[in-house]
Image: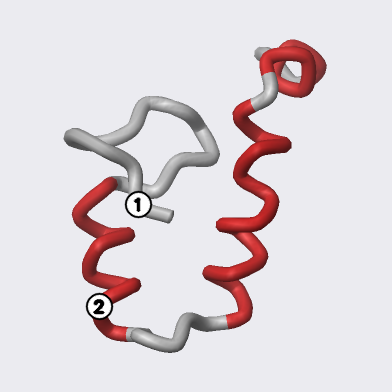
Amino acid sequence: MIGSGGTNQGIYEVPTETARIAHAAFLKGDKYMRVRDELRPIYEDEGFKQLFDK
């Protein structure tokens, strides 16, 4: 999934333009992109983030 707006701030975030280009280059997806897209909700969870805060 591509975020909305400019570059995302989180440590696990891919810049929006990079994600857009990757999805355009791999129209059917790529296994690594799919894994990241599927796991995104885990990394966006506030409880999970607090476990790994620096």
Q: Against 50, is 20 above or below?
A: below
User: Where residue 34 sits in the image (x, y, percent)?
Assistant: 59, 69
Residue drawn at point x = 77 percent, y = 14 percent = 47
User: Where residue 40 sits in the image (x, y, percent)?
Assistant: 61, 44
Mark 1 vs 2, N-terminal side:
1
What residue does disc 1 label?
Answer: 2
Q: Secondary structure at mark 2?
A: helix
User: Where residue 6 sits in the image (x, y, percent)?
Assistant: 18, 35
Please identify the quarter of the rendering in which residue 46 is found: top right
| Mark 1 residue crowding within 10 angstroms, few (<14) / some (14–19) / many (20+) | some
Residue drawn at point x = 44 percent, y = 88 percent = 28
Please identify the quarter of the rendering in which residue 44 is found: top right
Q: Are marks 1 and 2 in contact (CB under 8 Å)?
A: no
Q: Quadrant of the C terminus?
A: top right
Q: In the displayed structure, does residue 12 sit left or right of residue 20?
A: right
Q: Secondary structure at mark 1?
A: loop
User: Residues under labels 1 and 2: Cα distance?
Assistant: 11 Å
Q: Nearer the viewer, residue 48 or 28?
A: 28
Q: Which mark is residue 18?
A: none
Q: Quadrant of the N terminus?
A: bottom left
Q: In the displayed structure, does residue 19 sit left or right of residue 33?
A: left
What residue does disc 2 label?
Answer: 24
